[in-house]
């Protein structure tokens, strides 16, 4: 049996440079993403770090830093982390897995995970969500995004698309298309209350998938017993 996440890590190592060149500036053309990141930033507890998990080349962590947050980035791919450090030297980045985050209980005020849970299996999702709940401080927020459905001309196998090539490089990547209601239930079971659920279609520059955004909150003392 292979090491969990090894194929994903190796694949993103290979595409890291091309991915960075194509997507590092993508938030400039995504007003809804910027608005949700802004709303998220306003709601996280003050003074605590906010982590972008599955940060890739670090553009979301960089944006959060620009909003005045103590942002950091975590990614499975060492090559992505190397590029993130070169692009944004004043934000800390570290190699790590969302299935075993290198953070103390309650250490983070917020987590963003934009299109990073799409490579997890159904069995891995509860592990990741339990880790998110563990490292979030009471009152902390989680912002998730993921793909709901593929382009009309793309067939899936049980809601999964397997790619052997991406951005001109050989890869072995499974992309899971996820149901927002199911993800919301899984988050609730992990102890995170979903407060916002938004869906949208792809814009003209994106792969033609339907997408979802969820914002969830870890309860605190103000929620009562």
Image (tube, rainbow, N blue to C red):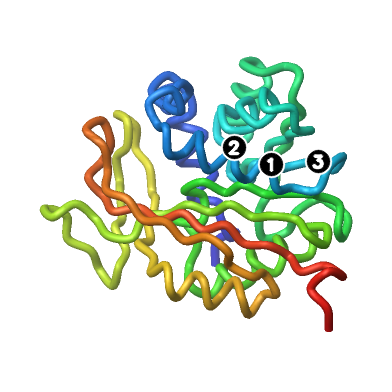
Q: Residue at x 49, y 70 (%)?
A: 183
Q: Which residue is mark 3?
A: 49
Task: Give the camera-side residue of 64 and 170.
Answer: 64
Residue at the location (56% across, 75% down)? 186
Q: CA distance from mark 3 to mark 2?
A: 16 Å
Residue 115 position, x and y percent, is 47, 48
- Give residue 84's position: percent from left, percent from top: 62, 24
In the picture, measured across the screen, residue 118 lies left or right of residue 132, that is: left
Q: Residues within 10 Å of mark 2 (few under 14, many from 20)?
A: some
Mark positioned earlier in the residue sequence (3 or 2): 2
Task: Name the residue tied to disc 1.
Answer: 42
Q: Residues within 10 Å of mark 3 (few under 14, many from 20)?
A: some
Evaluate if marks 1 and 3 touch, with contact meaning CB atoms under 8 Å apart. Answer: no
Q: Residue at x 46, y 56 (%)?
A: 119
Q: Residue furthest bottom?
A: 225
Disc 2 vs disc 1: Cβ atoms closer than 8 Å?
yes
């Amino acid at each position: 049996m292979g090491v969990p996440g090894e194929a994903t890590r190796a694949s993103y190592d290979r595409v890291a440079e091309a991915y960075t060149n194509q997507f590092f500036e993508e938030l400039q053309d995504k007003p809804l993403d910027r608005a949700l990141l802004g709303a998220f930033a306003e709601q996280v507890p003050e003074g605590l770090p906010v982590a972008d998990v599955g940060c890739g080349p670090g553009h979301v962590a960089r944006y959060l830093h620009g909003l005045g947050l103590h942002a950091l980035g975590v990614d499975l791919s060492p090559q992505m982390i190397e590029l993130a450090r070169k692009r944004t030297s004043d934000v800390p980045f570290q190699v790590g897995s969302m299935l075993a985050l290198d953070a103390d209980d309650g250490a983070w005020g917020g987590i963003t995970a934009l299109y990073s849970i799409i490579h997890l299996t159904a069995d891995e999702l509860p592990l990741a969500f339990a880790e998110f709940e563990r490292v979030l401080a009471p009152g902390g927020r989680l912002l998730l995004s993921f793909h709901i459905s593929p382009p009309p001309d793309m067939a899936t196998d049980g809601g999964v698309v397997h790619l052997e090539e991406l951005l001109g490089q050989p890869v072995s990547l499974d992309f899971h298309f996820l149901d927002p209601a199911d993800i919301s239930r899984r988050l609730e079971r992990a102890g995170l209350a979903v407060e916002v659920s938004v869906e949208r279609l792809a814009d003209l520059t994106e792969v033609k998938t339907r997408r979802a955004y969820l914002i969830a909150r870890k309860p605190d003392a103000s929620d009562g017993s």
